Image (cartoon, helix red, strand yellow):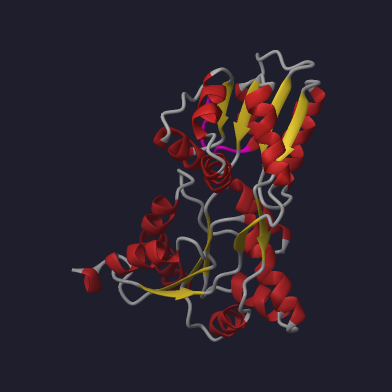
Amino acid sequence: MADQGPLAGRTIAFLEARRSDELAHMVEKLGGSSFVAPALREVPTEDDSAARAWLDHLIGVGFDSVIFLTGVGCRALLDQADAEQRLATTLSALAETRVVARGPKPAHVLNEHHVRIDFIPAEPNTSQELLDGIRDWDLAGKEVGLQIYGGATPFLVLLRAGLSKREARVFEVAPYRWEGPADEQPLVDLVEALASGRIDALAIFSSSQIHNLFAIADVHGHTARLTEALNGPRVLVASIGPVATQAIEAHGVRVDLQPEHPKMGHLVTALGPALSARDSAMAGSVA
C-alpha cells in the first residue's frame, strides 16, 4: 500500500514546474508527500524571427548536422514549423541531414515525428558524451544547426568550445528562455521548511533550478540558512545528473544522491533506499 511504501512518512521537495504533477504522483505512489516550489519557467521567446530564420536555413540550404539539446526546444521548433504550414518540408529536410538528440527527451519528440536519429550520446547524456560520440565526424567548415537551452550552462560552453575546435560553422537557435518563478513565495516557504526540519529530501532536476533557488534566497537574506539546512544531516540532496550536481556543488552544497540513470523516475525510486541508508548510518553513529 502507498502509506507503507519506501517513502512512507517522508516529505520530498522539488523545484520542478512543468512536470510537478507527475513527480507528485510518483512520490505519492511510494507513500510519500510532496512539497512543490517551482523555481523555473520555460517561456517561449517573444520574437520567433530567429527560429523562423533557422528553419528557413534548414529547409532552404540545409545543415550538415542538426543537434537537439532539449525536448522542449525540439518540440517548439517543430510546433512552429507546423504553425507555419511547413512541418512536412522541415521533416523532409531533417531526413537529409545527420540528426543528434542529446538525450531521451528530444529523442522522444523526434520519434513522435518519425525522424531518423543518427546519434544519441551515452548516459549521462552531457556535452562531453556528445562530443566524444561524434569525434569521427568531419565537421570542419560544415554547417551545424544547434538547438540550445533557454540559458547558459557550463556544459553548453563546453559544447560550443568543442564544436569551435572542430571548425564547425554553428547556427544556434533558442526557441525558449528560462525565467524565475512567477511567485517567489513557495521558494521562501521551502527555505523555512528545510531549516525547520520538515523536508526529508530535495530533488533537483536542472542546474537552473538550484541557481534560481539560491538567487531568491539571497534576495530575501536566507542564503546562509539555506546552505546550512542543505548541508545538515536532516536533508538528503538528490541530483538528476552531473550537470545539476556541478551546479549544486558550486553553491557549496554536498550531493547525497545521483541515480545511475539520469532520469526522473530513477531518481524518485532511489530516494527511499537512500533515505533508509542515511537513517541507519545516523543511528549507528549515535550508538
Residue 4 in the magenta stretch? The answer is no
Q: Which residue is drawn at the image coordinates 73% and 58% (left, top)?
A: 250
Residue 235 image position (x, y, % from top left): 52, 72
Residue situated furthest front in the rendering = 85
Quarter of the rendering containing residue 223:
bottom right
Q: Which residue is drawn at the image coordinates 46% and 49% (left, top)?
A: 259
Residue 221 placement, left or right of 91: right
Image quarter hosting the N terminus: bottom left
| Foreground residue among 219 and 61 | 61
Q: Which residue is drawn at the image coordinates 65% and 47% (left, top)?
A: 175
Residue 190 image position (x, y, % from top left): 56, 79
How many numbered circles are shown?
Answer: 0
Q: Which residue is drawn at the image coordinates 51% and 75% (left, top)?
A: 234
Residue 4 placement, left or right of 57: left
Quarter of the rendering containing residue 167:
top right
Residue situated furthest left in the rendering = 1
Residue 167 placement, left or right of 201: right
Residue 258 image position (x, y, % from top left): 51, 52
User: What main secondary structure does the magenta stretch of the protein show?
Assistant: loop
Can residue 121 be seen?
no
Residue 251 placement, left or right of 119: right
Image quarter hosting the C terminus: bottom left
Residue 174 image position (x, y, % from top left): 69, 46
Work out whether 18 lies above or below 4: above
Can residue 21 be seen?
yes
| Foreground residue among 222 and 130 | 130
Q: Which residues are magenta?
A: 119-126
Work out whether 91 lies above or below 48: above
Work out whether 48 lies above or below 205: above
